């Protein structure tokens, strides 16, 4: 039982440390190619957020000095997936138990799809917010970008799922 707890703690520690360095490394790479994962506001801006459970929720105004972009969110998802596999590998102390053929294809899909979605999200923001109507209706422009981003992610996921089926990669 103690061995199980130690392996769990080792897996958690490895996952947390890996996630921290992985996200910052991916952000550095993204900034190197001109993609902005985190927007910094100087001076800070006001933003409305919805806080609370569905019955007692209300809107509150907060001041923020930085915020994640769609590219940053895509990199967060990639970091979380990779951290999950690092935690499993640290727990089992074996790559062969963790990386089955299905898992390798799954991780490959994330390694290809997340940077692609980060670049695509950045491109959508640049394309939409260059338009004159985006300044007048920023909520509508943001919704258009989010919908285009979501549809693109769904299309990539469907393509990768089709490719895995075509290559006869099935879950265990």
Image (cartoon, helix red, strand yellow):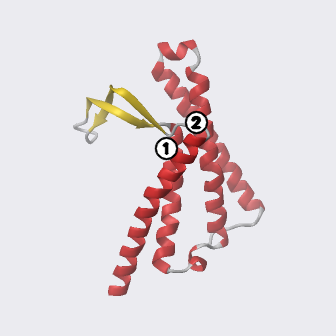
Kindly identify which numbered label has been placed on residue 149: none
Residue 1 visible in this rendered orientation of the protein: no
* Residue ID at (56%, 33%): 147
Badge 2: how crowded within 10 Å, few (<14), some, or many (20+)? many
* Residue ID at (62%, 24%): 127
Q: Residue furthest right?
A: 166
Looking at the picture, does residue 66 appear above or below residue 19? above
* Residue ID at (41%, 33%): 40
Looking at the picture, does residue 78 appear above or below residue 123? below
**Quadrant into which the C terminus falls:** bottom right
On the image, numbered disc 2 is attached to which residue? 121
User: Which of the 4 image quarters holds residue 164?
Assistant: bottom right
**Quadrant into which the N terminus falls:** bottom left
Residue 138 visible in this rendered orientation of the protein: yes
User: Which of the 4 image quarters holds residue 20?
Assistant: bottom left
Question: Could you tell me which secondary element the residue under label 1 belongs to?
Answer: helix
The reply, left or right, for residue 138 in relation to residue 98 is left
Kindly identify which numbered label has been placed on residue 73: 1
Q: Residue furthest left?
A: 56
The reply, left or right, for residue 18 in relation to residue 172 is left
Q: Pointer 2 and pointer 1: residues touching (CB < 8 Å)? A: yes
Rendered location of residue 96, percent (x, y) = 61, 79
Q: What separation in Å lies between label 2 and label 1 (alpha carbons)? A: 10 Å
User: Which of the 4 image quarters holds residue 106?
Assistant: bottom right
Rendered location of residue 144, percent (x, y) = 55, 27
Q: Nearer the viewer, residue 167 or 135?
A: 135
Rendered location of residue 66, percent (x, y) = 38, 35
* Residue ID at (52%, 59%): 81
Question: Could you tell me which secondary element the residue under label 2 belongs to?
Answer: helix
Return the disc, 2 or 1, that comes first in the chain's sequence.
Answer: 1
């Amino acid at each position: 039982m103690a061995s199980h707890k130690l392996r769990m703690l080792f897996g958690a520690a490895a996952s947390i440390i890996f996630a921290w360095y992985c996200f910052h490394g991916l952000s550095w790479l993204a900034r190197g190619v001109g993609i902005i994962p985190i927007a910094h506001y100087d001076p800070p801006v006001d933003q409305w957020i919805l806080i609370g459970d569905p019955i007692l929720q209300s809107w509150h105004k907060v001041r923020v000095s930085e915020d994640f972009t769609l590219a940053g969110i895509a990199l967060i998802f990639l970091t979380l997936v990779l951290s999950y596999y690092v935690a499993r590998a640290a727990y089992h102390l074996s790559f062969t138990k963790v990386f089955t053929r299905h898992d390798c294809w799954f991780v490959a899909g994330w390694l290809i799809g997340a940077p692609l979605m980060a670049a695509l999200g950045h491109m959508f923001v640049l394309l939409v917010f260059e338009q004159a109507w985006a300044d007048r209706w920023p909520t509508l422009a943001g919704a258009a970008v989010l919908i285009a981003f979501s549809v693109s992610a769904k299309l990539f996921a469907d393509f990768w799922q089709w490719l895995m089926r075509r290559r006869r990669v099935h879950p265990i």
